[in-house]
Image (spheres, helix red, strand yellow):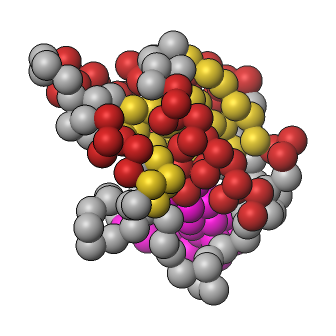
Amino acid sequence: MSSALKNLSEYDEKNFPSSEGMKFGVIVSEWNNEITHKLYEGCFDTLTKHGTKEEDIFTLQVPGTFELPAGAKIIGKKEILDAVICIGCVIKGETSHNEYINQSVAQGLVNLSIMTGVPHIFGVLTPNDEQQAKDRAGGKYGNKGVEAASTAIRMAALEKSLKKSKKSIGFSNKK
């Protein structure tokens, strides 16, 4: 989350997992493309910086942010992925459309994460105005694309570490 207290692009690279051998889907909204393409660049650069091969990043563009969950489901049917990153930007504007879109997209991505067991990352900016979006797409608050990619890597690494250890966390089905 970006604010004056935390830059989106800052994270501890020394204690960060490698993304080598991982595959990611990146769904990008074409709406507000000046913003979303900068977010995508930050996302892509972060994935490759940590070991993901370019050919293991599967990108799909959708018309708008509302279509991100459908795009995520489409790419998930086509590729076996470690995580899916959804990038969009919904600027508040004069009506409350942003509330409906943001809530629907967030819920759709949560549902996909739960149904598939694959993390679906909410890399959507929800600013009040265009300047706030620019500040969070490579501006003074960093780049939420970097944050989304680092979250995806960490979640995928968590899944892989649990598979290796065969230890259970949380509730168990054993009686």
Q: Is residue 134 above or below residue 152?
A: above
The boundaries of the magenta stretch are 147-170
Most extreme residue toward the bottom is: 14
Q: Can residue 5 be seen in this view?
A: yes
Measured as percent of width and height from the top left, residue 32 is found at 45, 25
| Residue under the point 52% across and 30% down | 34
Near-viewer residue (171 or 68): 68
Q: In this view, does 76 lie above or below 126?
A: above
Q: Is residue 147 above or below residue 95?
A: below
Near-viewer residue (97 or 131): 131
| Residue under the point 55% across and 74% down | 167
Most extreme residue toward the top is: 63
| Quadrant of the frame with the N terminus | bottom left
Measured as percent of width and height from the top left, residue 139 is found at 45, 54
Q: Dividing the picture into quarters, in which one does residue 64 lie?
A: top left
Measured as percent of width and height from the top left, residue 148 is found at 50, 52
User: Is-magenta flag for residue 153?
Assistant: yes
Q: Dividing the picture into quarters, in which one does residue 77 lie?
A: top right
Q: Is residue 109 visible?
A: no
| Left or right of residue 77: residue 64 | left
